[in-house]
Amino acid sequence: MKLKHLLLLPLIGLGISACDDAEVATHNLKKAADNFEVNRRIVFYNGITDSYILTIEGRCSIDLNQSKTAFNVICKTGTSDFKRHTLVLSDNTTAFVEQLDPIKASAYHYRVTFKPSAIIPDIDVR
C-alpha cells in the first residue's frame, strides 16, 4: 500500500473524505469550542414570558443530552477550574449560542486533538 493511501485511511474512517469546506470548518470550530478556545454567549430564553432565564459568557462547551431534554454548558474559568450548568428544556424554554469573537478555522485541514491526560489516567494511591 502506498503512503498516500495510508494517510487517507484515517480520513475515510472519520467519514470526512467527501465533506465540503463548510463541514470541515464547522467541525474545526466545534472542536475549538469543545477545547475551550471560543468565547461564547449562551442565552436561555422563556418564550412565554419573553424573558431571559440565564445568560452565560465565557469559554464554554455545549451539548444536548441524548433525549434532547437538557442543555449542558461547561465553562473553563481557570487553568483547571470548570463550572457546569444544566437547563432542562421544555416547550416554552429554549437556548441559543452566540460566538462572540471570530477565530481562525481551516476549511482544508481536519482537526483531531489527542490529550495525553485522557489516555494516561491520573491515579490516586491510597
Image (cartoon, rainbow, N blue to C red):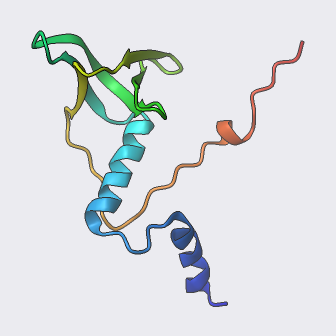
> In front: 98, or 66?
66
Q: Residue at x 71, y 42 (%)?
A: 119
- Is residue 42 visible from the viewing direction of this image? no
Q: Position of residue 60 (x, y in %)?
A: 37, 27
Quadrant of the rendered image containing residue 7: bottom right
The number of callouts visible is: 0
Q: Position of residue 50 (x, y in %)?
A: 9, 13
> In front: 91, or 103?
91
Q: Residue at x 31, y 53 (%)?
A: 26
> In front: 52, or 23?
52
Q: Residue at x 20, y 32 (%)?
A: 98
> In front: 121, or 78?
121
Q: Quadrant of the C terminus?
A: top right
Give the residue furthest to the front. 91
Quadrant of the rendered image containing residue 110: bottom left
Q: Position of residue 58 (x, y in %)?
A: 31, 22
Q: Is residue 114 above or below residue 93?
A: below
In the drawing, does residue 121 fall left or right of residue 61? right
Q: Residue at x 13, y 13 (%)?
A: 48
In the drawing, does residue 104 fall left or right of residue 10? left
Give the residue furthest to the right. 126
- Is residue 74 visible from the viewing direction of this image? yes
Quadrant of the rendered image containing residue 21: bottom left
Q: Is residue 88 above or below residue 108?
A: above
Q: Position of residue 93 (x, y in %)?
A: 24, 19
Give the residue furthest to the left. 50
Q: Quadrant of the N terminus?
A: bottom right
